Image (tube, grey):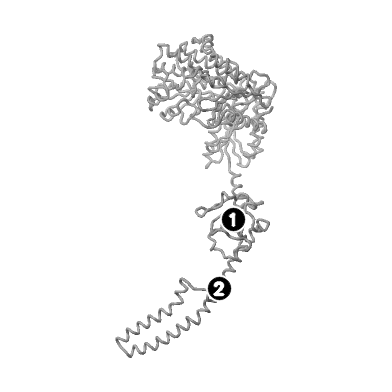
Amino acid sequence: MRRLIKLKGAMRLYLNWPIFLTILLICMNLSILTVDKKAAGLMAIFVLIYAVIAFLLYFVKKPLIVNELVRFAAGYSQVQRRLLKELAIPYAVMDTEGTILWANDEFMDMAEMLPKQKKIKTIIPEITAENLPTVENDVSLHVEIGERNYEVCLRVVNTPSFDEDILWQDVQRHANELIALYLYDETEIVALQRENEDQRLITGLLYIDNYEEAFENIDEVRRSLLTALVDRKINKYMVSIDAIIKKLEKDKYIFVFQHKYLSQLEANKFSLLEEVRGASIGNDAPVVTISMGLGVNADSYLAGYELARGAIDLALGRGGDQAVVKDGNKIAYYGGTSVQVEKTTRVKARVKAHALKEFMEGKDRIVVMGHSIGDIDSLGSAVGVYRIAKTLNKKAHIVINDVTSSIRPMITRFKENPEYEDDMFIDGGKAQETMDNNTLLVVVDVNRPNYTECEALLSMTRTIVILDHHRQTGEAIPNAVLSYIEPYASSACEMVAEILQYIGDGLKLKPLEADAMYAGIMIDTNNFLTKTGVRTFEAAAYLRRNGADVTRIRKMFRTDMPEYYAKAKSVAAAEIFENRFAFSVTASEGVDSPTVVAAQTANELLNINGIMASFVFTQFGGKVYISARSIDELNVQVVMEKLGGGGHMSVAGAQFEDCDLMTAVERVKDVLRQMIAEGEIKL
């Protein structure tokens, strides 16, 4: 055994030093001989004695030294093996396929089994063949085993690092590499992190949406009773989540609660909304609705408050009666199923009108833009803004890329009328050439940047005004200097008609412009059948006084035979889903504006008895468009938002770019099934 052991490296060099030193002394003795023979002779005697001793030590003691080294190495190996086996950290060795080759006592206790020759995934399912480590990259995972939490570290090691005896003998290694696995118990750390997360404070804002409308028409006693009832419901709800709430104004509250209660609020979908809506002190008592905005996971309390403010603004911009939870750029909506209450006061419209006038007066040019594949509401509201600009003696343009059949008759009348400039209508490319910092961009009938006629214009000016009646989503046009979004309004034309009345005495609509705006209200309200209020008819009356002719408008927007046939065919082929939803597909071949036909078809399907909502699909321009309609039983805007779209409670839509018609139909059905299962839709 000793003969088989060959010393190498520093140990061999260390044992050979006496021989090297003997040679050195002989050389030195020879050098002395040339100087003094007597001294050299004396020196030779001592060198000889040293050489004999050195050689005796080398040849006689070397086997003993080697034996001591072998004994030390064996003892060290045993100690190392015992330390590894009794290591307090669970440790195992696997081959490159995930088969356990060896594990220490702690690992086997943790696994509650003898893991001999077992795959690691049978013990820790999170470790699969796909996430095993490589030579270049170690792997770290966080897993839960039993009631304990562990951090699993996986690292590739070379097989020479392990003795042959340390691995289980009946397991053969087929590779030059092994995988070492360590488990670090982090149960206490995870518990502390969870506790810290649960105790983080969330800031929330609560507003009563319709305080003035709900309380102004009831007597003082009943008003006090209703106010006390609403306050009691709000405070009782806040006590249930251990929240601190403070009333800032008569209709505004701020509250703070721990993060651990957020999941409870989300699970019951902020039931306070329904509780307050159901508050009543009599059959003729007004319905009170509230909105809530919460800022979650902010870095500071100030940042959390700013998130809450953004959330409550979004909730109000979507019509109120809902809760919005804002976690950075991630936004979740709850509620919003009731019909928006129309504001009886026009104070806001007057304030926005004066602000718009000031912005226009400070700019040289006005560019008005609606949504892509424009409809008559988008065109009519743009024409109204165009008239304001011309009244203020400003150069103005309306951006329209594609003239569809729904707006072609009206645009033709404008182009044929010599009173209007040739560049009244321009495309997106021409608009980009005219844009500068002295240009005001007015966006009408849309509040999402990717739905606009030319999104590039939004980054080419610092002054942007938004006038829209669609409910807001998390995707908003940034840096707008004036944003007037009223979801309760029937149409953008209604909003612009109100603004026109506060611009000044010098403004006078021409009959053709009044026709365009009146047509926009008619189309968006389905001939005044949906989303109409007192202010809708007041706006219509204003337009009639300015020369709008209903007969002329009706004749202008009659349907061509191919489109009428496509609509009739789509209605005839409708499928009834879950006995309450109408689904249909509108053909786009031979139809100039298939999206308009789809919208008309969706309106027609609502006339079928028992239908809660209708969904009509059409493929156009490489996209699948969905038109969703309802009367009052289902908020189709919530359905479309789950698919990336939006709109109103009764009028909404969405677009798909990555699927065909049948896939789009199944996506909508899947959303409806999910909402039915979760109780959001009650059949």
Q: Around disc 1, counting alpha carbons within 10 Å, would you say few (fewer than 14), some (14 to 19), or many (20 or more)?
A: some
Q: Is residue 360 above or below residue 515?
A: below
State left or right for residue 374 relative to residue 245. Answer: left
Residue 376 percent location from the top left of the image: 51, 18
Q: Is residue 167 above or below residue 325?
A: below
Residue 67 percent location from the top left of the image: 54, 76
Residue depicted at 60% across the width and 55% down the height: 183
- The residue at the far left in this view is 35
Residue 537 percent location from the top left of the image: 56, 14
Residue 531: image quadrant is top right
- Mark 2 touches mark 1? (CB < 8 Å): no
Describe the element under mark 1 as helix, strand or loop.
Answer: strand
Dot 1 amino acid type: Tyr
Q: Tag on residue 184? A: 1
Residue 437 percent location from the top left of the image: 38, 28
Residue 289: image quadrant is top right
State left or right for residue 136 relative to residue 226. Answer: left
Label 2 vs label 1: CA separation? 32 Å
Dot 2 amino acid type: Phe
Q: Which residue is mark 2?
A: 72
